[in-house]
Amino acid sequence: MKNREVFKLISTLEEHIRKRDAARAAGGQTDPRVLAAMERGMRAVRELDPIVRENCRDDPAALAEWDAIMRNFHDLEEVDSEGA
C-alpha cells in the first residue's frame, strides 16, 4: 500500500470519528459494530506509525504530511478518551 493510500484511509477514519462524536453530542447512538471497527482502525494507525515513519524517512514532504495526520489522530484520541 502506498503512502497516499494510507493517508487517505486514515483521513477517512478521522472523518468517521468526528461524525460519531457529533452524533454523541446530539444525543444519538452509535452502532456497537461501528465502534468496534473504529477501534480496530485506530489500533491499526498506532501500529502503522513507526512503519510509515521508517518508510518516509527519506521523503520530508511525506513525513511532514504523516506528522500532521498523527497530530490530528492524537487529538481525536484525546477527545475520544474524554468522551468515553
Image: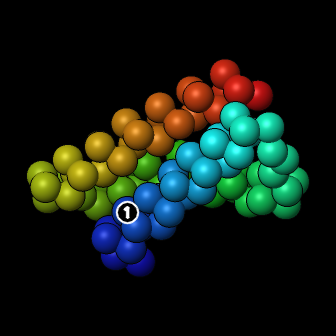
Look at label 1 and name its amino acid. Phe
Q: Is residue 47 left or right of residue 3?
A: right
Could you say whether the residue bearing mark 1 is in a helix, strand or loop?
helix
Q: Is residue 15 left or right of residue 8?
A: right
Task: For residue 5, say whether it is visible.
Answer: yes
Residue at which label 1 appears: 7
**Residue 14, x across and y down, in percent:** 51, 51
Q: Residues within 10 Å of mark 1 (few under 14, many from 20)?
A: some
Q: Residue at x 48, y 34 (%)?
A: 74
Q: Residue at x 56, y 27 (%)?
A: 78
What is the quadrant of residue 61 in the picture? bottom left
Q: Is residue 76 left or right of residue 65?
A: right
Q: Is residue 43 left or right of residue 28?
A: left
Q: Residue at x 47, y 31 (%)?
A: 75
What is the quadrant of residue 40 in the picture? bottom right
Looking at the image, how many numbered discs can be counted on the residues? 1
Front residue of 27/65: it is 27
**For the C terminus, which image quadrant?**
top right
Up the image or down, 8 lies above or below 79; here it is: below
Residue that protrudes farthest toward the top in the picture: 82
What is the quadrant of residue 3 in the picture? bottom left
**Residue 71, x across and y down, in percent:** 37, 36
**For the N terminus, which image quadrant?**
bottom left
**Residue 17, x across and y down, in percent:** 60, 48
Q: Residue at x 50, y 63 (%)?
A: 12
